[in-house]
Image (spheres, rainbow, N blue to C red):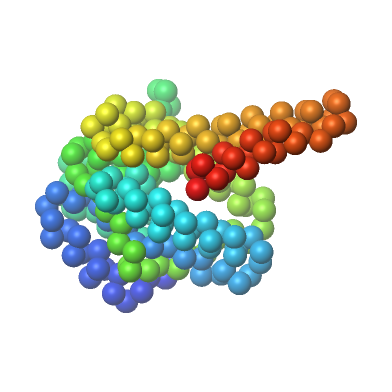
Amino acid sequence: SDTEIDSDVVSKLVRKMQNPAVGAAMGQLKASNRNDSWLTRLIDMEYWLACNEERAAQTRFGAVMCCCGPCAMYRRSALLLLLEQYETQFFRGKPSDFGEDRHLTILMLKAGFRTEYVPDAIAATVVPDTLLPYLRQQLRWARSTYRDTLLGLHLLPGLDRYLTLDVVGQNLGPLLLAISSIAALAQLALTGTVPWWTGLTIIAMTMIRC
């Protein structure tokens, strides 16, 4: 409802489905409202990096870890096999209804299907243009990432070592960044000194991740 896909997106994603081993494929996302604010411009940049670095790297191993909802295609026969698991998501004994795109992608990988990225299948989606809705969205996505990483941990030994490193980095990086940021603020508040070493640590972590 909030996304416009290019006229050739379906045909480009269908080409991937000619390989029976592929269970899902996703296209490249852009922010349709990129020019609305500084935040939408940054989100558009974030989408470009997520698609053309992260997903592009993962597709080399047939294991895109999240086929994003606004522009994804699934093999019907594979979806039917997974439908009951998908419709009855539980986490720690409670029904779970967030992060459905990542959850379905993990189910595809667990079932032995490949998941792929198609960079020239373009979709433009509306992104949050103010900070509070953006933070709510990111919190929801983070919950999904950590939940489905836990569900898919046993997949990692069977995937390429690069993917294991990538998944570990995706999950540990933000936690370490949060701890470093809190430590920096605490040092500034309690001692009145500038947390240079913490700042350098954050910069180093960011460069390593990039």
Q: Could you tell me which residue is drawn at 69 percent across and 33 percent down?
A: 198
Image spot of residue 159 (x, y percent): 26, 36
Image spot of residue 53 (x, y percent): 41, 54
Quadrant in which residue 29 is drawn: bottom left
In-image side of 57 versus 49 (left or right): left
Task: Determine the residue located farthest toward the bottom in the rendered image.
Answer: 7
Image spot of residue 75 (x, y percent): 19, 53
62 and 2: which is toward the camera: 62
Image spot of residue 171 (x, y percent): 47, 34
Q: Could you tell me which residue is drawn at 63 percent across and 70 percent down?
A: 36
Q: Is residue 95 visible?
A: no
In-image side of 172 versus 26 (left or right): right
The vertical placement of 120 against 16, above or below, is below
Q: Could you tell me which residue is drawn at 59 percent across and 60 percent down?
A: 42
In-image side of 19 versus 74 (left or right): left
Task: Determine the residue located farthest toward the right in the rendered image.
Answer: 192
The vertical placement of 43 against 62, above or below, is below
Q: Is residue 65 visible?
A: yes
